[in-house]
Image (spheres, rainbow, N blue to C red):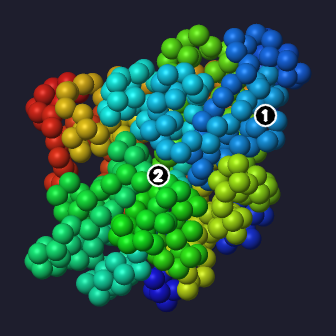
Amino acid sequence: MSDTNATNEQGQTNLSRRKFLKTGGLALGGATLLGGTPSWLHTSAWAGEGEGLEKTKLTLGFIPLTDCAPLVVALEKGYFKKHGLDVALSKEASWANIRDKVAIGELDGAHMLAGMPIAATLGIGALPKATITAFSMDLNGNAITVSNDLFERMMKADPEAMKERPVSARALKKVIDADKAAGKDPMTFAMVFPVSTHNYQLRYWLGSAGINPDQDLRLIVIPPPQMVANLKAGNIAGYCVGEPWNERAVETGIGQVLITSYGLWNNNPEKVFGVNLEWHEKNPHTHQALVMALLEAAQWMDKPENRMEVVSLISQKSYVNAPEDTVKMSMTGTFKYAKDEAPRPLPDFNVFYRYAANFPWLSHAAWFISQMYRWGQLEQPTHILKTAGSIYRPDLYRQAAKALGVPYPTVDVKSEGTHAEPWTLKDATSPIAMGPDRFFDGGVFDPSRIAQYITAFPVKSLKVDPEALLKANA
């Protein structure tokens, strides 16, 4: 990508890494940590003795990505201990491992893709197991990367489309059409899991250009740490993954980033902390202590002066196991799209607390369910917001936030795609500064018209009767 024509994705040109590290523009709201801590948690919060908790010795799973950071920070900076919890973190090889180990109780809870508790509860890809989340771990964090060869082909196919910011998939559509005309096999792209944010983001980007991911190319699953090796080997032409595996491809000179998930959907939900519903019902106080510890960790992490320490912690072999110079790019407010380019300011690539990032919005869950219907993963009509409310649990988040004196939303849903600029959420215990939420194609997600939203997509693979879905959500 040329610096001459490049402008940052959706208003990100105004902050340099230096400014991010100095000020960050963070609206932390002056939260009083531990203010109003409930009586049952006083001893555990202050003395770390765990009085009042049903279970104190816990094993939590994670995947080696930069957004596992809230768990790492909560452990390494003592927030778990502060709330009476003795936590061990278990690095897992794949999202399937996370799903299965939480389901059978081998893990007490885990770093999960935002769609995983939904899929687990509804039985997508495995036997149904009621799973919930009371805590969103972060916003943004992914990107779409392609091989140098495919990038060059896209540049030749439609140089004007490649100059747009954010970059659409229009040039890719021309390459795919040319391959079809030449009788070539479809190219292969990778994502990390069938119910991942990465899958839905990649499909959304492709579909907006008229590419049907179920017909025009092959989509396969590859665990995040294996993406770069498969791109280098030529097994895939591109992928959507979280950091640091996009910057790793750039730094090693084997690929170029086309668009980040922030560019696709400003301040989109990414990971959550998930537990079995059964586990929560047996351990409600322990669950609240976990959420409180993670919330304190997230606040600390989103202070710019702490980001380099976060980089140092998560880069370790026992966690992400990647060079600090690669990890620090996105974590300190910049992002590099190509090896021969200077890093560009992108201060919201990783958001861990600001913009009500930790609140489990039912509208976020509903958007993921909409994409599960769109791409044929769900076949039976259901009331989507009611389903979302049984899995995403803002009530539990509010209990933890109230105990800490942290501002929290007083509504469960919000529209997406209607704010191109920062705005203020007034439906909250005190006003919360929010970031833009625009989709790159101008789309709007209205939680009161979810069925209409799903059926209106020109590119989709529905396996549900549209009328039945409309009726169920009337």
Q: Please name whichever residue, 402 or 119, is drawn nearer the observer in this view of the structure.
A: 119
Residue at 54% in and 62% down: 245
Count of all numbered marks drawn on residues in the image: 2
**Where's the C terminus, which quadrant?**
top left
Residue 54 in the image: x percent, y percent? 69, 11
Bin the neighbour count of mark 2 within 10 Å (Cα to Cα): few under 14, some 14-19, many 20 and up: some
Q: Please name whichever residue, 99 or 372, is drawn nearer the observer in this view of the structure.
A: 99
Residue 106 in the image: x percent, y percent? 57, 25
Residue on which the image places disc 1: 79
Residue at 81% in and 29% down: 81
Mark number, residue 9: none
Residue 199 in the image: x percent, y percent? 36, 51
Residue at 71% in and 64% down: 324
Q: Amino acid at mark 1?
A: Tyr
Q: Is disc 1 placed on a helix, strand or loop? A: helix
Bin the neighbour count of mark 1 within 10 Å (Cα to Cα): few under 14, some 14-19, many 20 and up: many
* Left or right relative to 435: residue 446: left
Q: Amino acid at mark 2?
A: Pro
* Left or right relative to 264: residue 208: left
Q: Please name whichever residue, 12 or 117, is drawn nearer the observer in this view of the structure.
A: 117
Asked whether the residues under the numbered discs 1 and 2 touch, taking CB atoms below 8 Å apart as contact, a structural biologist would say no
> Which corner quadrant of the image does residue 154 belong to?
bottom left
Residue on which the image places disc 2: 223
Q: CA distance from mark 1 to mark 2?
A: 29 Å
* Left or right relative to 208: residue 423: right
* Residue 428 seen anywhere in this rendered image of the structure: no
Residue at 80% in and 16% down: 50
Q: Please name whichever residue, 54 or 18, is drawn nearer the observer in this view of the structure.
A: 54
Seen in the picture, residue 25 relative to 399 is either above or below; the reply is below
**Where's the N terminus, which quadrant?**
bottom left
Earlier in the chain: of badge 1 and badge 2, it is 1
> Which corner quadrant of the image does residue 150 belong to?
bottom left
